Image: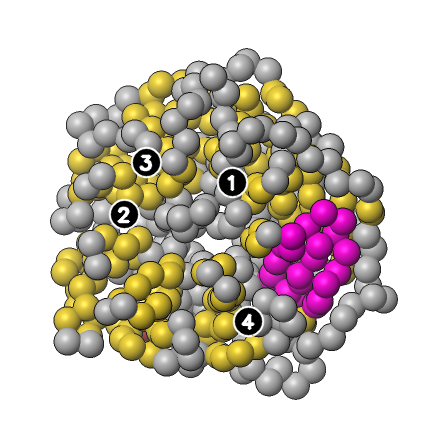
């Protein structure tokens, strides 16, 4: 682990903060509860017709984290070959600072660019990129606190580059930070040192889920070959199930915890399944092809799951039965807030719909983009919805009451 000074290309301006009273935050992937569920209720389904702001950030699929009036995300500049960690004013979109460093584009079967999401922890922000550059930056100024290149010469951690690079985001649980790099890893937040590394579970692209099992902290991840549960304390395997075998499938979705069981879905066979832990073994309760999550996965609302089965938006019950299907939206991403869904459709439209199992019912639809792919979750913070296209446009839409 080393400090990176020679590769730093920062653009530093005074941090822009705003006062929102009792601010909501979205500090990391899947939010403050790590569930993909927003607790906000004071927002309108029908937003204002014009953008609150719109900026260009560079190629990629990174979503946003928001805390203390600041928005953090990532983007890739193809012309200069630089990844950038951006800090913007969440209300105005103005740049507070930008930290840039060299990276390859990784344009394999898509445009390439960034795929990870920064995680905010008080006065610092953590960021992992697809090549294994792990940064801790000062959240106000963008100055580097520490940097660890996980794939440094010697690769003492036994990591291999996945086809699309390291795609999981730093998972913050209390005083701990965890990464999914095919091997699950625990990182010292103060120094960037690797505390432990699990066995190799194959090339996975999702962020793990953290929860308690028998009073102890565990992580669950769906990687290239297996669904695994490991101890947060030392990475020891508690249970695993070979899910894709040697296919090393496209597993990018975060597992969903359902009353002590785990729902997972893959972009390849065998698609979706729900697992129970019985006498130390993961046992399939059911497996089917009803929900094929190619990217960010499902959200749980009440007794149902909502997500994209490839090109079809679906509602599915916990027994794996489809409640409804809505075609014509394209492959996108879903967030939930109370009894509503925020859907970034594959056609470049932001859709607000009811999170109800009886039928699909739209509340509003707004066209946002006309070029790119739309695999990035829309994020709702303080009544503002942030959406992104793979081409680099980020837009903030005003849904405040």
Question: Does residue 78 appear in the picture of this structure?
Answer: no
Q: Secondary structure at mark 3?
A: strand
Q: Residue at x 76, y 71 (%)?
A: 3
Of 274 and 33, nearer the camera is 33
Question: Does residue 270 appear in the picture of this structure?
Answer: yes
N-terminal of the two: label 1 or label 4? 1
Q: Is residue 31 magenta?
A: no
State the image coordinates of residue 315 (x, y, percent, origin top left): 24, 37
Q: Which residue is mark 1?
A: 25
Q: CA distance from mark 3 to mark 4?
A: 36 Å
**Is residue 166 left or right of 3 when viewed as pictured?**
left
Q: Nearer the viewer, mark 2 or mark 1?
A: 1
N-terminal of the two: label 3 or label 2? 2
Of 160 and 274, nearer the camera is 274
Outermost residue toward the front in this view: 21
Q: Contact (CB < 8 A) between labels 3 and 1?
A: no
* The image quarter in which residue 52 lies: top right
Q: Is residue 136 magenta?
A: yes
Q: CA distance from mark 3 to mark 2?
A: 9 Å
Q: Residue at x 50, y 64 (%)?
A: 175
Q: Which residue is mark 2?
A: 291
**Is residue 307 left or right of 73 when viewed as pictured?**
left
Q: Contact (CB < 8 A) between labels 2 and 1?
A: no
Q: Contact (CB < 8 A) between labels 3 and 4?
A: no
Q: Nearer the viewer, mark 1 or mark 4?
A: 1
Q: Which residue is mark 4?
A: 187
Q: Nearer the viewer, mark 3 or mark 1?
A: 1
Q: Which span is picked out in magenta?
A: 123-147
């Amino acid at each position: 682990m080393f400090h990176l000074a020679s590769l730093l290309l920062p653009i530093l301006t005074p941090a822009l903060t705003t006062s929102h009273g009792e601010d909501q935050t979205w500090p990391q992937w899947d939010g403050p509860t790590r569930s993909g569920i927003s607790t906000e209720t004071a927002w309108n389904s029908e937003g204002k017709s014009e953008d609150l702001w719109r900026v260009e950030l560079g190629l990629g699929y990174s979503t946003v984290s928001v805390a203390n009036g600041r928005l953090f995300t990532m983007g890739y500049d193809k012309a200069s070959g630089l990844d950038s960690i951006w800090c913007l004013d969440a209300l105005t979109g103005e740049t507070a600072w930008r930290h840039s460093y060299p990276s390859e584009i990784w344009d394999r079967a898509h445009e390439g660019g960034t795929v990870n999401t920064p995680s905010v922890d008080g006065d610092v922000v953590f960021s992992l990129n697809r090549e294994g550059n792990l940064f801790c930056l000062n959240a106000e100024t963008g100055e580097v606190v520490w940097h660890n290149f996980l794939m440094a010469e010697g690769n003492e951690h036994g990591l291999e580059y996945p086809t699309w690079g390291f795609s999981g985001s730093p998972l913050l649980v209390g005083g701990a930070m965890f990464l999914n790099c095919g091997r699950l890893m625990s990182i010292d937040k103060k120094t960037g040192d690797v505390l432990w590394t699990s066995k190799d579970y194959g090339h996975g692209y999702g962020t793990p889920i953290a929860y308690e099992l028998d009073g102890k902290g565990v992580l669950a991840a769906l990687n290239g070959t297996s669904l695994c549960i490991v101890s947060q304390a030392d990475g020891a395997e508690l249970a695993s199930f070979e899910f894709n075998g040697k296919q090393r499938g496209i597993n990018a979705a975060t597992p969903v915890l359902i009353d002590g069981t785990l729902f997972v879905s893959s972009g390849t066979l065998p698609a979706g399944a729900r697992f129970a832990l019985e006498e130390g073994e993961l046992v399939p309760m059911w497996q089917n092809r009803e929900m094929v999550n190619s990217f960010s996965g499902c959200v749980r609302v009440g007794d149902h799951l909502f997500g994209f089965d490839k090109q079809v938006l679906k509602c599915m019950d916990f027994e794996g039965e489809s409640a409804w299907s809505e075609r014509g939206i394209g492959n996108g991403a879903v967030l939930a807030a109370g009894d509503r869904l925020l859907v970034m459709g594959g056609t470049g439209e932001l859709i607000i719909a009811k999170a109800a199992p009886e039928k699909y019912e739209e509340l509003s639809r707004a066209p946002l983009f006309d070029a790119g792919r739309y695999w990035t979750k829309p994020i709702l913070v303080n009544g503002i919805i942030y959406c992104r296209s793979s081409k680099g446009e980020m837009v903030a839409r005003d849904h405040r009451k």
